[in-house]
Image (tube, rainbow, N blue to C red):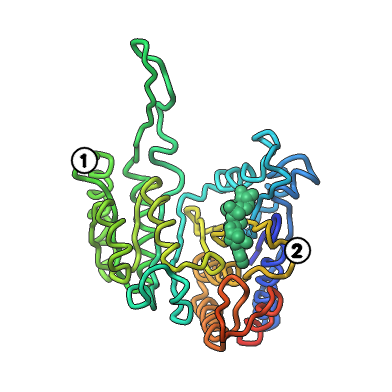
């Protein structure tokens, strides 16, 4: 298993260090893991003059999976756009053709108070949003602002080919096979032809996965159902723009950004795994960050790229055990629990493993 490690900026360095300790446990048990570090983001701009330098490109392309911390920080905010850390992120996603974004939203019963919703609505929540990442209105042509008859007109094009829909649909069905075997496809077929095609193609591929139940929901209803009764969902699959909005809505059901991992996959299950949060400059370098989102990203890596459900399940169980034992970093701390640093949280997960 060749893993390209990109700690990035800010807390990225601290949280990735803890995630690597988890991988070391598996290594010590004989799992064949090779890691190679490279630079991405602001640190890469400083050291190599580019947010996604050629050396990083070579290592990332040769790897089976990429583990990323986070990029960005105020010291680079005024750089010209090509030298902004976020350009590195977009660059690597495009370069590796990562078209499928998987974002689980899991609410551990111990953290139910962190959500703004009532505990009974969210406690035990475990859903997965599968978002198409490289198509849709964000990339469709024609686009732009033009002047027509003396008035400015803004235009974007919502477009999906059946191949694009089929490949993201298959990712969702396969993810559901590893979970509770339900896919809810979200569209706006009552108004948008692009999404009528989306629904048609989802129905066409469903028979390839007879063990998975397919349902459909209009996006406006899906937004509502996510806050009304989110536990009705297992896997939700949708296009780029609807997924952008719904995945943020879903992740906030949990209330704790330091707990949320993500995966972005290509057609061969090569993936980039990263926490959903940013580089948290306000707490960087203080050993305060919550490393669990990054540790859970390693679990996703083992599950989705390396197909090792057992190892992934062990990480998930270790995180649950540590939370049940009352260990909390500052972001999820409540009176009556034990406050630990970033590295102490790593110690606890390693011990639980
Ligand atoms: P952020 O996610 O970095 O931080 C938001 C808040 O959440 C902060 O108060 C931070 O301390 C807290 N937080 C985030 N992760 C945490 C963790 N693991 N443990 C404890 N607390 C945590 O978002 P921001 O402040 O808007 O952005 C900071 C920088 O990160 C910016 O430069 C932004 O561009 C970048 N960013 C990068 C990514 C990425 O690398 N994928 C994503 C979002 C933002």
Res. 67 in view: no
- x, y percentage for residue 206? 26, 60
Res. 102 in view: yes
- x, y percentage for residue 58? 70, 48
User: Would you identify the image quadrant in which residue 232 lies?
Assistant: bottom left
Q: Quadrant of ligand 1?
A: bottom right
Q: Residue at x 23, y 44 (%)?
A: 196
* Residue 12 - label: none
Looking at the rendering, in which quadrant would you find the C terminus? Answer: bottom right
Front one among 125 and 56: 125
Residue linked to disc 1: 191
Left or right of 128, for residue 19? right
Looking at the rendering, in which quadrant would you find the N terminus? Answer: bottom right
* Residue 285 - label: 2
Left or right of 82, for residue 134? left
In the orientation shown, which residue stands out farthest toward the front? Answer: 335
In the orientation shown, which residue stands out farthest toward the right? Answer: 47
Q: Is mark 2 within 8 Å of ligand 1?
A: no
Check disc 1 and report its element: helix, strand or loop.
loop
Q: Residue at x 47, y 53 (%)?
A: 267
């Amino acid at each position: 298993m060749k893993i390209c490690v990109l700690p990035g900026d800010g807390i990225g360095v601290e949280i990735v260090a803890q995630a690597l300790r988890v991988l070391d446990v598996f290594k010590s048990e004989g799992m064949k893991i090779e890691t190679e570090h490279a630079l991405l983001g602001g640190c890469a701009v400083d050291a190599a003059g580019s947010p996604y330098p050629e050396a990083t490109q070579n290592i990332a392309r040769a790897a089976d999976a990429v583990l990323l911390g986070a990029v960005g920080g105020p010291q680079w905010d005024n750089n010209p756009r090509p030298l902004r850390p976020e350009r590195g992120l977009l660059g690597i996603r495009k370069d590796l053709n990562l078209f499928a974004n998987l974002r689980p939203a899991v609410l551990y019963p111990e953290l139910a108070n962190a959500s703004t919703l009532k505990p009974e609505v969210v406690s035990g929540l475990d859903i997965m949003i599968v978002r198409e990442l490289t198509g849709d209105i964000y990339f469709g042509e024609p686009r732009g602002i033009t002047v027509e008859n003396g008035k400015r007109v803004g235009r974007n094009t919502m477009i999906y080919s059946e191949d694009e829909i089929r490949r993201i649909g298959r990712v969702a069905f396969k993810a559901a096979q590893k979970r509770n075997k339900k896919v809810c496809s979200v569209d706006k077929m009552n108004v948008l032809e692009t999404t009528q095609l989306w629904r048609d193609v989802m129905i066409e591929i469903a028979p390839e996965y007879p063990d998975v139940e397919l349902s459909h929901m209009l996006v406006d209803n899906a937004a509502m159902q996510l806050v009304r009764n989110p536990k009705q969902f297992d896997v939700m699959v949708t296009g780029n723009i609807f997924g952008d909005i719904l995945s943020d809505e879903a992740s906030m059901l949990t209330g704790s950004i330091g707990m949320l991992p993500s995966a972005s996959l290509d057609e061969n299950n090569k993936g980039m795994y990263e926490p959903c949060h940013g580089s948290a400059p306000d707490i960087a370098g203080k050993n305060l960050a919550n490393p669990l989102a990054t540790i859970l990203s390693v679990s996703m890596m083992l599950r989705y790229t390396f197909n090792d459900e057992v190892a992934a399940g062990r990480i998930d169980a270790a995180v649950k055990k540590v939370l049940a034992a009352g260990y909390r970093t500052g972001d999820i701390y409540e009176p009556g629990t034990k406050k630990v640093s970033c590295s102490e949280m790593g110690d606890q997960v390693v011990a639980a493993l």
